[in-house]
Image (cartoon, rainbow, N blue to C red):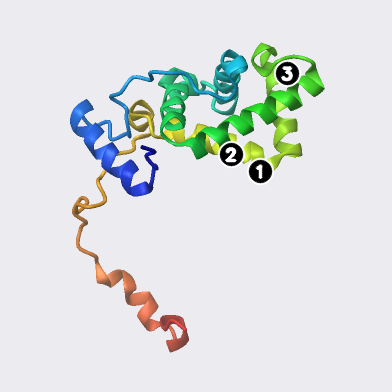
Amino acid sequence: MKRRLTRRRLLEEGLRGSVLVGGAAIAGLGRPATTPVRAKASTEPDFTGALRAAADEIIPASDGMPAASEVGCVEYLTRLTQEDASIRRSLAGAIEALEAATREHFGNAFARLKRAERVRSLRAFEHDRPETFAVLRDYVYEAYYTRPKVWKLIGYQFYPTNQAGSRMKPFDESALNQVRKKPRYYREIS
């Protein structure tokens, strides 16, 4: 049975995860990755290595923030690709395109390049194939910014959308006094 990952399903799984893992609120965080991502059977190590290297160049460690691979981004993406074939196809396609472009320009696999060459390769890939680069970048961003460790470091607090949020202070209507003195066309919405 194919399970399609929808927003609703992601939230449901995330809420289950928060109960199981203690505030994690991430789909499937409590489950270990059981099998590697299958881009092509003959290139699995290259795929995972390229994904890890690309993620760490897109989001490198800096200013007290961990690199993408340090917080489990590759493992998160592995779980997503196991659950949804369309994610697997799009992510594998992006990595395969990056590998092809890198081999063409640098004559080597992306993960085997030195850091400066990986940065140049990603910049060229972004310039030459912006839509494909965006797919890779967006998956890495999702994987990074859904990690509880990153949430803590950036000060994000998870609030379920089906519950009332924190209480707001009463609005001080005297703040509108200046606007009330303006002509009518400043106060009306057209």
* Residue situated in front as seen by the camera: 164 or 185: 164
* Residue situated in front as seen by the camera: 148 or 51: 51
178 in relation to 45, above or below:
below
Position of residue 11 in the picture relative to residue 125 (left or right): left
Q: Position of residue 171 (x, y in %)?
A: 24, 65
The tag on residue 155 is none
At horizontal 42% and vertical 84% (from top left) the residue drawn is 188
Picture quadrant of residue 25: top left
Residue beneath disc 3: 117
Q: Which amino acid does label 2 sit on?
A: Val
At horizontal 62% and vertical 16% (from top left) the residue drawn is 43
Q: What residue type is labelled 3?
A: Glu
> How many angstroms separate mark 3 from mark 1 (CA)?
21 Å
Residue beneath disc 2: 135
Label 3 sits on a secondary structure element that is helix
Q: Where is residue 18 in the image (x, y as percent from the top left)?
A: 23, 33
Q: Could you tell which of marks 3 and 1 lies nearer the N-terminus? A: 3
